[in-house]
Amino acid sequence: MDFRFSEAEEKLRSEVRQFLQEHMPELDPVDRVGSIGGLVVSENAFEKAMAFNKKLAERGWIAPGWPKEYGGLGATIYEQMVFNEEFGYAGPPDTGTRVLGVGLLGPTLIVHGTEEQKREHLSGITSAEVIWCQGFSEPSAGSDLASLQTRAVRDGDDYIISGQKSWTSEAHHADWMFLLARTDPDAPKHKGISFFVLDMKTPGITVQPMIHMANRHHFNDVFFDNVRVPKEALVGEENRGWYVGMTLLDFERSGIIGFASQRRTLETMLDHLRGSPQRIREKYRLGLAELMIDNHVGRCLSYRIGDMQAKGQTPSHEGSAMKVFQSDLLQRMANFGVKMLGLAGQLLPEEPKAPYDGEMPESYMIAVPATIYAGSNEIQRNIIATRGLGLPRG
């Protein structure tokens, strides 16, 4: 593959970069470094993220990769990579519109949704008016997602949903949720699951905050007590929701945003090390160089996935390899950064004297679940072994 972008793509990069420099909102340190995937952690930052997304919507940049008939630009894979890389490096805040609405639900509805569902939901995403959250994980169904127990029982023209979802990002802000629920409890666990969309204002839904180890409110538990939704909330066929959900997760695997964000962090660490005493520079310079090399490797892994997609191929174990490499690198970076800063590496964003706004200790804690969420690294290694290397199961 050719790692160089075309002249037109580099011109687009300059345009995107300039837009971000002019329109990205200023955030408090805790909101800037305490986010996961750019999703905000305070009400003040949420309002700023909403305003920023609406500026994107005015320019038609909310969903550049979507077909034009659904409100996108019909951007090529390489153009999408330019957008994602620049957004990843700059780190603009998000409400869930871009990460969840554009990145996950929208493409899934374009593939599996009815024309009525597309008309009802896609425009709300591209206008940045409607916030979505994802209801997949449960207390006993994370990486083994097919073990989910939330039930959806058909009742005339409705479904009645009961159960619990956990680790639900932005549920406290979301207008709508897309979720998986079991519609046939007697079917094998990967079957008998259906995919639904539902209004978060529907009676019977309770959202409870889940404070994570960095003491931020990002996740939530969501409880469903006989929540009645119309049959039109079903996406795809009944009992075939697992395959709809796997389509959605295919859109989750690219990684360029993460490696671009990590490059910004590494450059900040480099600036700090340059200004440190010689003994500190000598102690940590080779370790930092290794991390920067690894991040360049990760960038190439992401480019490989984009190149495959541009050629009409479907990445599988390649995406798993990227996820394992990126999440492991994120943890190694945070561990290294905290050690390099010494005692100051314990200062959180609330501390005025915290080096680069307390990013390192915050990242240290936020990075812990990175090897677990979005499919644990153990699951990803199994995929690499069976689909990539052809090793037998068992």
Image (cartoon, helix red, strand yellow):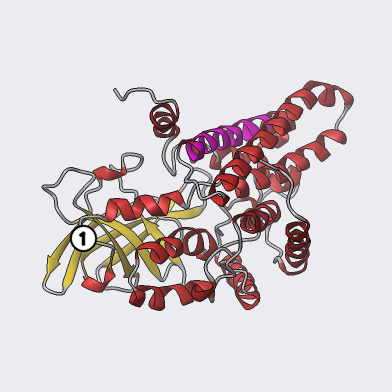
- Tell me: 157 left or right of 168: left
Q: From the image, tell me which residue sits under label 1.
A: 238
Main secondary structure of the magenta stretch: helix
- Where residue 18 sits: x, y (%)? 78, 64
Front residue (pair 306, 363): 306
Identify the magenta region. Answer: 318-336
Label tally = 1
Residue at point 55%, 39% (across, down): 367
- Asked if residue 117 is among those painted magenta in the image, a careful observer would answer no
Q: Is residue 40 above or below residue 145?
A: below
- Where residue 199 sits: x, y (%)? 34, 72
* Residue count near mark 1 (Cα–Cα under 10 Å), binned few <14, some 14–19, many ≥20: some
Front residue (pair 219, 186): 186
Mark 1: secondary structure: loop
Quarter of the rendering occupied by the N terminus = top right
- Tell me: 251 left or right of 347: left
Front residue (pair 198, 393): 393
Residue at point 66%, 49% (across, down): 349
What's the residue type where badge 1 is placed? Glu
Q: In this view, does 273 lie above or below 190?
A: above
Q: In this view, does 391 lie above or below 79?
A: above
Q: Can residue 394 be seen in this view?
A: yes
Quarter of the rendering occupied by the C terminus = top left
- Where residue 365 sits: x, y (%)? 55, 39
Q: Can residue 128 be seen in this view?
A: no
- Tell me: 199 left or right of 63: left
Residue at point 31%, 48% (across, down): 138
Q: State which quadrant residue 168 falls in.
A: bottom left
- Asked if residue 321 is among those painted magenta in the image, a careful observer would answer yes
